[in-house]
Image (spheres, helix red, strand yellow):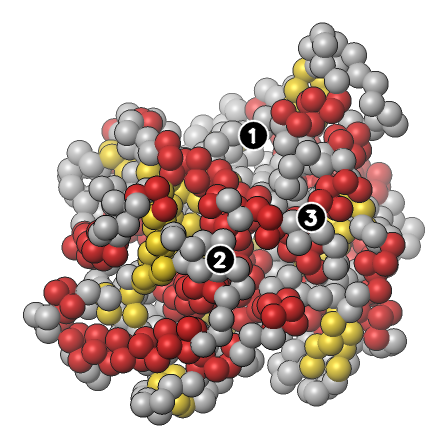
Amino acid sequence: MDVELLSKPRRMCRRLCLPLCSLSWLLALMQTADLSAATQHEVVRAETLSGIAKQYGVSISQLRTWNQLPSDVIQVGQRLTVDVDQYAIRAGDTLSQIALRFGLPLDRLRQYNGLKTDNIAVGQILRLKPPHRDPQPPRRKTTTRNHTPADTYKVRRGDTLSEIALDHRLSLTALRKLNSLQGDGIRIGQVLRIRAPQPEQVPQAYTVLKGDNLSTIGARFDVGLQMLRRLNGLTGDHITPGQKLRLRPSATEEGIHVVQAGQTLSQIALLHELELQQLRQINGLDGDLIRIGQKLRLRSTPTTVHVVERGDALWEIARAYGMTVNRIRELNDLTSSRIYPGQELVLEATAERRFANYAVRRGDNLSEIAQLHQMSVDEIRRVNDIAGSIIHPGQQLRVRPLNAKQHWIEQRELPWDQLLLHPTTTRIDAANGPYFSTRPKADAQSGPKYFELHPRSPLAAFRQARQLWKGFDAAIDKMGRLSNALAGWHIVLDPGHGGVDPGAIVPTVDGNGQRLFIVEDEYVYDIALRAYVLFRLHGANVDITLMSPNHLFRHTTPPTKTFVHEQNEVFNLLSHNSSDRPTAWPMGNPSDLRARVQIAREAFQGVDTKRTVFLSLHADITPNAPAAPLVLYYEGRGGSNRDDASRRFARAMLPALGADAHTRGQSLGVLRNNPAGVKALVEVGNLAHVEDAWALRYEQLRHRNAEKVVRGVLDFAGGRRLAQR
């Protein structure tokens, strides 16, 4: 099946990519461009109007107005006017990326904004046109009357939540999440967040003081010596007072570029200062065709070097290559287990010979298989002696060992499939199953508004779910233990949303460009169940706040068959369901939060508070936040009533969650007045980014998310000896 690459390069880019083309010639062309006109965007395959709006930081309504579009339907090759004067900087942006996106010479963008360097900050507003231009009048008067800080908005008479979201270039779901809103109700005078609070700041640079040495600086800022040397062009460890050292790689120095809508291979090469042919060679590309969400490697390294990607954790890299964490730290002069995107880790010489087998399934393509196993297409071709991109169902491919479920099976031979057998309930196998008693009518989520109602009442669904769970627990008991590291600990897992409330329903694309929809609550429930099993296998007592009457964790075969929004999950609380009224279903309102906290309160009765953990699992959808796990602890407005114990817990989880994982405080109802000794809300990824939406479809990567969460709790609880294996 030759299912490679979908995006179509623009004609201009094809001309620019001829052999006689040089980077300096392209830059000269950009310098002479007429910037008085609005930006023109040519629609490429698989793009949507909403995706283009997100790319340029404008609203769909503005795009339709500027281009006189009667609907959201657009055609490949169609040219759209993007007449935007300003741009709000988002996490991961660089000045050169922004200049490239809007067709501006870098020096002119600096000139418009009075910048002497390329340093920018998230939330900063950049001018995209000369400052003497009259600013475009605001669409709505309410925004001009609002004098609250730039990251908040004060609700005025006549405002609606959807209008506020549109005005501030946010999706309605993102605005709800930012403000912990369960519905769309707002009140006059209410102050809403319109920009995500910044994660706890990590210094990007340090000025050397008298008495400093490179080792102490590396230890103080949690950065390995080899990376510190590479970032600063040091051949040894000599530094001098007053010298400024870089501590973190920039976004353009990461080893991976994720293709966004509208990008071409030549643009990406220019952005990362690579020759086009070099970028093709690194990624085994025969031409310039690329697809949205594809990961492109930006540098070639020996097979005994691992380039860290966002989400990679040191403990899982060690397991994938058959090494210990301590050995990798020793080889790379690491003082801790924190690693960063773009960091190069030296491995044992024998690590390159470790491979696993992957059986090609219907719908697979070589690019997605390579991405799943953190390989380039060129590498997977070389390892398997494949000349092109055509593969067949059933074909066996040698791949890098996956950092997830395979390890548990290979090392412990745990009978995972036995957890999906039930003595009293009929099992129904499906593309995304199995299910028990009933299954969804649809094989995949067909759109943002599709849902299926459960045929039973809340109380009947609760009883059915409890019966299903009873068999599930019994099967886990028969599996034995991985360790006793969490013996005496009590954990409550809280899968976010559920019932009538799906959380976010996010469009994405698969490797063939087919549009898919991800339903947040269905996927985080699957992750929570996997974490439930692993916590039990490490000796913990575990409860869950939400249960489904017809499924446990599920397989994804193929991942094009996405989970359907079934409104059938119920709270694991008899008193909540005993009314048997429709309002007992999870609805996404404040009473739901109280039910989740009440379940924790009952679970933790008589338990030592110091050994209690509450974890609420979600998938973020915030465009101006990075594509990486986020751990939230409770902190009131303005930094009041901060839960310091939970803050320490959140920080302790970061190495296990992987590179670029971050933490911050937020006023969240599910954490407020929660009786757990430590409690956190974990956003396992950010669905606003195509790579995270892509990953969530894969069972192996959902299991990887569950393992990360469990490993983070093990580290906090004192099980670090396990992480060294």
Residue that carries the numbered disc 1 in the rendered image: 202
Within 10 angstroms of label 3, few (less than 14), some, or many (20 or more) residues?
some
188 relative to 48, above or below: above
Q: Mark 1: give few (<14), some (14-19) or many (20+) Cα within 10 Å.
A: few
Q: Work out whether 172 lies above or below 89.
A: below
Can residue 564 be seen by looking at this rendering? no
Q: Can you give x and y, in whole percent of width and height, for residue 162 in the image?
A: 28, 51
Q: Is residue 314 or residue 384 the one in the foreground? A: 314
Residue that numbered label 3 is attached to: 325
First in sequence: mark 3 vs mark 1 = 1
Name the residue furthest left.
579
- Residue flagged by tag 3: what amino acid is it? Val
Q: Amino acid at mark 1?
A: Val
Query: Label 1, label 2: how many angstroms apart (C-alpha)?
Result: 35 Å
| Residue 545 vs residue 232, the one in the foreground | 545
Quadrant of the rendered image containing residue 220: top right
Q: Residue at x 23, y 50 (%)?
A: 606
**Residue type of the residue flagged with mark 2:** Asn
Quadrant in which the C terminus appears = bottom right
User: Of label 1 and label 2, which has the lower sequence position?
Assistant: 1
Q: Secondary structure at mark 3?
A: helix
| Residue 134 shown left or right of residue 720 in the figure | left
Q: CA distance from mark 3 to mark 2?
A: 21 Å
Give the quarter of the image for residue 581: bottom left
Q: Where's the N terminus, which quadrant?
A: bottom right
- Where residue 234 appears, as percent x and y from the top left, is 84, 26
Residue placed under numbered mark 2 in the picture: 484
> What is the CA distance from the residue labelled 3 to the residue labelled 1?
24 Å
Which tag, 3 or 2, sits closer to the chain's start? 3
